[in-house]
Amino acid sequence: MDRSTFILSLLFTLTVSTTTLFSPVFAGTFDTEFDITWGDGRGKVLNNGELLTLSLDRASGSGFQTKKEYLFGKIDMQLKLVPGNSAGTVTAYYLKSKGDTWDEIDFEFLGNLTGDPYTMHTNVYTQGKGDREQQFHLWFDPTADYHTYSVLWNPHHIVFMVDDIPVREFKNLQHMGIQYPKLQPMRLYSSLWNADQWATRGGLVKTDWSKAPFTASYRNFRADACVSSGGRSSCPAGSPRWFSQRLDLTAEDKMRVVQRKYMIYNYCTDTKRFPQGFPKECRH
């Protein structure tokens, strides 16, 4: 173990909890792992807890959250997004902590007219500050079948993944004075809602309510993660691979290909937005 890994391991021990228990964290069913938090019946758990659906109509959207909070881990979920004319709709899928100075790791899927691609929007918030948007078009139809959207979150970096292909990395650059999520446990949330004032072509295309209800589907949730409760964290037994996992050269190459071919917006190249110079993390 090199010195930096040792220091991060020590930091992990100190920041996760003063008391850490070790136990496996496996995939669970939606009825045991999640609460449907809003939508007045528009969120449904089906197939003996193996499937969850969220619906949106003119009256309301819907949403759910995990019963547990996590502090570092690898989170996987398979989603099938709203098919057909999904313009104006947003399917949000994100980790978020509590409070006014929250941390957040954010996927949002912005709907579009039939035949036009979804926009996958990503962001990272630290201490309540975001403004780190990167957006992509996907290289497949995300409404035709389920695809896996993952977050790897450890003391080294946050990696956004689609079908195990890394698409974005946010590194821990605290030595440069850049905040990094490491102290606040987060729940996993998802919601389906109407955002036609901005979601599709800057709000020019409105939601077609004649196509409602709009439905997104979820399956195969897995949290290989440290579960936080009452100031204590329970982590997977042994030394979880994800804790020290970094991107190897093959993974970095795959990420660069995705970013070159499918990224449509990067805050780190937006000179109009940052005329005085890009944020510090954009240099790395």
Image (cartoon, helix red, strand yellow):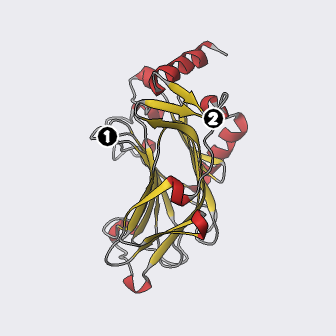
**Label 2, residues with CA under 10 Å away: few <14, some 14-19, many ≥20:** some
Look at the picture and state if 206 lies above or below 237.
Answer: below
Q: Earlier in the sequence, mark 1 or mark 2?
A: 1
Dot 2 falls on a residue whose secondary structure is helix
Give residue 270's position: percent from left, percent from top: 40, 46
Taking the image as drawn, is residue 123 in sight? no
Q: Amino acid at mark 2?
A: Trp
Nearer to us in this view, 20 or 74: 20
Residue at horizontal 47 percent and vertical 27 percent from the top: 16
**Residue shown at 60%/67% (left/top)?**
48
Q: Picture coordinates of residue 158 (x, y %)?
A: 53, 38
- In the shown orientation, is residue 250 left or right of residue 53? right
Up the image or down, 100 lies above or below 209; here it is: above
Figure check: 79 above or below 126: below
Residue placed under numbered mark 2 in the picture: 242
Residue annotated with mark 1? 128
**Image-based side of 236 in relation to 183, left or right:** right
**Can you give x and y, in whole percent of width and height, for residue 64 in the image?**
43, 59
164 sits to left or right of 150? right
Query: Identity of the amino acid at label 1?
Result: Gly
